[in-house]
Each structure stands twice: as C-alpha cells, then as structure tokens.
Amino acid sequence: MDTDYELNLLCVDDEQGILRSLKRLLRNELFGVLSASSGAEALELLASESIQVIVADQRMPDMSGTRLLEKVKEEYPDVMRVVLSGFADVPSILESINRGEVFRYLAKPWNDDELKTVLRQCFAHFNLEQENKKLISVVNEQKTELEKINSMLAQQVEKKQLDLSSSEDSLQQAEAGLRILRGVVENIPLPLFGIDDNGQIVIANAQAIALAGNNVAIGNELADVVGNDVDSRIKQQLQMQKQQIQELSEASDSQLKIQDLEDIDVSFGRVRAFPLAVDDKNRGGIVVITQSTA
C-alpha cells in the first residue's frame, strides 16, 4: 500500500472498530495512518512501507503487543514503539518499557488529546534521532577526511625533513670540501689568492697576504690589491686563456697549443693569472705572485 505521506503511523489491533476510531481521530494530523489487524500483518507492512511510529494493542490473539514490539525493535530499531492496553496489563507493559522494547504506554480507553500529543512526540523524537544520525555521519566523514589530510601533511613534513636532512648533508659536504680547499691553498708553496667573476677576492693564503699586504682579504676587490689598470690586464689575461682553452678543446688540429703567459708587474712584484674554469658558471681565476719586491 503506497501513501502520499512522508511520515506514517501504523496502528495494530484485532478489533476493526478500534482501528476505524484511530483513523478518524488522526485524519487531520501531519502523518499518514496505516492499519493492521494482527502482528503478522503488521510485520508485512513494516517490510513494504515507510513507517516511523507503531501503536500496538497489547491483547491480540496471535501475538501480544509487547511481543510484536519486541520483534519490531530487533528488525526495525529506528521505529518508535507505543503499546495500547488496559490497566490489567500494566506490569507486563512496565517490564517491556524497562527492557526498551516500548517507548511509550497509552491506556485504554485513551484520551484523544493525550494520544495525539504522544504520537506527535514520537514523530518529533524519530526526526531528532535521524538528524542526530546524519550529524554523526557527517562528523565521522569529516573526521575521516581530517585523518587523511593529517596523514598527507605528516608525509609531506616527513619528506621535507628528509629533504632538509639531505640538504644539510650536502651543505656539510660542501663545507668540508671548502675546508679542504682552503687547506690546500694555504699549504701550496706559492703565494696566491683566488677571485670570482666580479674580481672579488674569495680565498687567499698567508704567503700572498704577507707579500701583497692586508688588502688581500676575502671580500675585497682585486683592484684594491693591484690597482685599476692591472685589474683590467689580469681579467683580460684570464679571458684570453679561457678562450684559448675553449678553442683547443674544439679544434681537430693537435698542433694548436696555449700561448705562454706573461707576468704582469704590480706594486709588490709580478703576478700571473690562471682561469679556474672555462664554462659559463665559473669565470674566476687564481692570481699567483711569481716575484716579490719584498
């Protein structure tokens, strides 16, 4: 049996007169009214219809009201259950209420206003329970999504930590290499200092500082040590050598060779410059003091 109501009440009683009276009483309520004359018929309707509240008479020949509502609780736990009975059945009704099979008890003969109030409360309680379930479902879904997000963030943090650890290892290796390079430069038996592509001093050994003076300090400009004119000549010498090395590496004529370098006069002696590399990433050089006036 289909209904036009979103909410439905099922009345169960073996007396047709009782069922007709309930339908007349509740015809203007905001829920549909279905009826069954036995427990078995009630269970069939519950299996095929959308029913939110059931009212069952306690004294029915095939199945008592409390027994029917016990089955309803097992199979349809969301359905609100109300038992309708005379005062003689109160002990068994109270026991059923205590076990949770019955939500409310209505006495026969019923008070019309009380019956309507109880049924409205049942539908309100049903709706509230459904809303609570929806909210709990939403909360659980959000919790699951939050757990996924937290897991992703934890993985990203772990990856960042690994990347930072790797970067730290690389930095430590670079620092170790720089210390070795400084040690090599310091112990080479030649006074020398290194410059970058802009002519800034980036490394120097004690011998070079002793011969050329304190201007050979890391961070100073080459021009501060040798003067502007010599600065230009040294940079030209470096550029010329890098060009020659590049041409030699690209030429098929094995007879080509790099021209001999010339020493350049400076205030503290003579110097000669050697390029550090020939690629575009590193254009610095090493300036060796080949003769000192000291």
Image (tube, grey):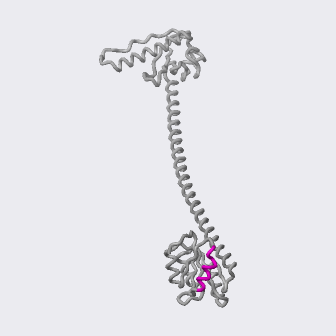
Q: Residue at x 51, y 38 (%)?
A: 167
Which residue shows up at 52% across the image and 76% down it?
A: 46
Nearer to me, 136 or 84 = 84
Left or right of 108, for residue 168: left
In this view, the residue in front, 273 or 233, is: 233
Q: Name the magenta segment's main secondary structure.
A: helix
**Between 151 and 208, the one nearer to me in the picture:** 151
Above-or-below relation of 45 to 250: below
Indicate the quadrant where residue 57 lies: bottom right
Question: Is residue 217 depicted above or below 122 in this figure?
Answer: above
Q: In the image, which residues are magenta?
A: 17-28
Residue 190, compared with residue 137, is above or below; it is above
Asked whether residue 80 is drawn in magenta, I would say: no
Camera-nearest residue between 48 and 237:
48
Q: Is residue 221 left or right of residue 285?
A: right
Residue 10: % across, % down = 57, 78
Find residue 242 and report its horizontal and vertical position in percent: 42, 18
